[in-house]
Image (cartoon, grey):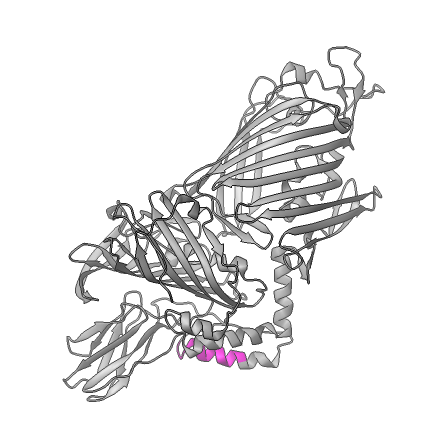
Amino acid sequence: MSPIILHCCSQPLLKFVLEKFVVFTSLLLLYTSVACSQSTVVSGRVIDANSGDPIPFANLIFQGQSTGTTTDFEGFYEMQINLPVDSIICSYIGYKSRTKAIFTGKSQVIDFQLEEDIISLQEVVFIAGENPAIEILRNVVEQMAGDDGKPILPVFISESLSESYYRNNPKLQHERIIKSKISGVGVDDGSLVSQFIGSSFQEYNFYNNWLNIVSKDFVSPIADGWNLFYEYDLTDSSVINNDLCYRLDFFPKREQDLAFYGTMWITKDEYALKQIDATIAKSANLNYIEKIKIQQELVKTEAGAWIPSKNRILLDIGEITKNMAGVLAKFYTSNQNIEINQVKDLKFYQQPIVLAEDYQMNNGDDYWLDKRHEPLSPTEMSVYTMIDSLKNIPIVKTYTELINIAVNGYKKVGKIDFGPYITLYANNSIEGNRFQGGFRTNEDFSNKWIFGARVAYGTRDEEFKYGGFVERIVDRNRWTTVKTEYTRDIDQVGLAAEDLLGNSVFLTATKFGDLVRPYLFDQFKFTAQREIFKGYNQKVIFNYRTFDPLYPFAYKTDPEQPDSPVESQIQTAEVTIESRFAKDELFIQNENTRVSLGTNKWPIFTVKYTRGIAGIVGSDFSYNRLGLNIRKNLKLGLLGTSDFNISAEHIFENLGTANILYGYLDPANNNLLADLDENGNIVEPIGRLTDDPYIELGYGIENIFKVIRIDFLHRLTYLDNPNVSNFGVKVSFQIIL
């Protein structure tokens, strides 16, 4: 393959690009052999009996002798001796040692499958209407798992080849995925998966003090405060690829800490990390995760810095219940063709991850045979065939379809997605039984135009609710879209269901039970947005909305007059300009949508100015509203994570809208509210804040039985209001790995 350009200046200012080859699979079973020649020569491979992964850096020694060796990163070894020996011992930290007999004076292949000290066997069982092909697959799976391993059923495998660019100051990354080959049960389009399994998500830098894995921070064994978290043993020294290295075994001082145990090799001359095998055990209390293992081999660059040349990552998620199968996910990354000091300007890093336009074209076996950094074994190659067979089994197809609908909410039928299915039925005090159906177009219809619509009907109010939208994707590089939408539906004061349109689960929840202060609304909305430069997004919105309360409500049209007329309906027309800045936010593109994965270090700032214009299409008010929002997920190391969200908003004129419920309500706005309607009937009063701030304190306990969180809430102000309690308990459910 032609060289790939990378750049680097010096050790403090490291800039480089790598050719990445990534293999991600739910099954990676390797079994090969290396030929040997004369004397007593033993070669073979050492793998994990549980997962089938190779075990690098394992120790092998002839019984009763001092002659030995270690396996390479792929688990292969070769050793010879001229003395009479009858057995060979294989051992490695965290595994049970094994001894196998050998023949003196011969060349032979001896492979080892090492078991962990503590393992929990898993089974793959199919019941009720089993397809005859299952029995064949079960036998194949048992063969692939090994003679003393647990059975594993392959459901997904992928390979990707990419160019990866890195700049250290400022820290920037850019990955261009050249080719991607994906096969999996329930996987129709691989564009999103290709971005998730790209090398950008599989890199772990142990020189950082903390490594973020499954949303938790683990302390590195070479962190600045290493002596606070780890114990170390200097166990050996050996020459690894011409570098004399010290071998250090490391262990957490406290089992419950988010720390690793394992082995690392440090070069004698530069004290650089040469290779490392780090494992996070179940004792770290990671709920359903049984084990996380990271194996890494590093090489020295021309600039002097050491970077990973090979990475292997294993994530073992155990069974949630005894009748459910666990999940074994594996990543393998190989870095080659490293080039230094090829400077790229900042614009080059505008998009952290991009897909080549032809990343799925000319994607046959011949291409991958030529481009793979290391060939797949025959067993790995057969996984593709097995998955294709598995996808065609009727019971598997049925369950896959149900899972896809549950996760995505939509059923894809050609160029149309029907759903979301969770909104098909609801029941509430206004509509009675509510039935709804909808659709949207997908990328097969167009990668530039998106159309969608929905309609709902209530059996109690006998009213139709409906909505539709048209969206145009103008530019995918600097994400630019224009969208027009119209909606007629019901909502509840204070809930703002409009903000939940992207979350069908919570949106559906607002349509159940007794609706509090419900109202009917019509809304026309036009939105245009563009990413001006990396991290900065500009949005312009025109929004027309009506408010037709389905509960007693009224406001004074002229609060300066004691006998002011009152109205219950409201119409507003407003223009909003929104500026959003997120310096290091990472996005991936999923068909016709862009998904944010959050920021790394910097908070997200949003400034919004809204101008309400009276008289346009019957709008009742003119006003100016200015808002600011700052939010950030804080990583606190061993203390976990914390989210802060700071919002401030001010309306400069008198306006009887949502600010009558939240925030400070000045006298002018307070006078807008009417306690009587135009017929003199008493209306339901709205809770009003005075000069005193509303204060509420809470604390909670989470991860009860791994799924339950209980929060205790105390109200400290406004305790004299009628029907107000100063204490409450909230129970919620969550699944956290």
Is residue 81 positioned above or below 578 on the image? below
Is residue 404 positioned above or below 38 on the image? above
Report whether 632 appears left or right of 12: right
Q: Does the segment drawn in magenta span residue 84?
A: no
Report whether 54 appears left or right of 395: left
In this orientation, does residue 191 appear? yes
Quadrant location, the N terminus = bottom left
In depth, the one of 412 and 145 nearer the eye is 412
Residue 94, image quadrant: bottom left
In depth, the one of 430 and 440 nearer the eye is 440
Give coordinates of residue 500: x percent, y percent. 63, 42
Is residue 261 positioned above or below 150 on the image? above
Q: Give the residue at x 18% y 87%.
A: 39
Residue 462, image quadrant: top right
In depth, the one of 558 and 231 nearer the eye is 558
What is the magenta segment's predominant secondary structure?
helix
Give coordinates of residue 439: x percent, y percent. 71, 53
* Residue numbers of the magenta segment: 137-148
Is residue 228 positioned above or below 397 on the image? above
Total labels drawn: 0
Give coordinates of residue 306: x percent, y percent. 26, 55
In depth, the one of 354 and 86 nearer the eye is 354
Residue 279, image quadrant: bottom left
Give coordinates of residue 288: x percent, y percent. 46, 57
Report whether 332 appears left or right of 689: left
In this orientation, does residue 86 appear? no
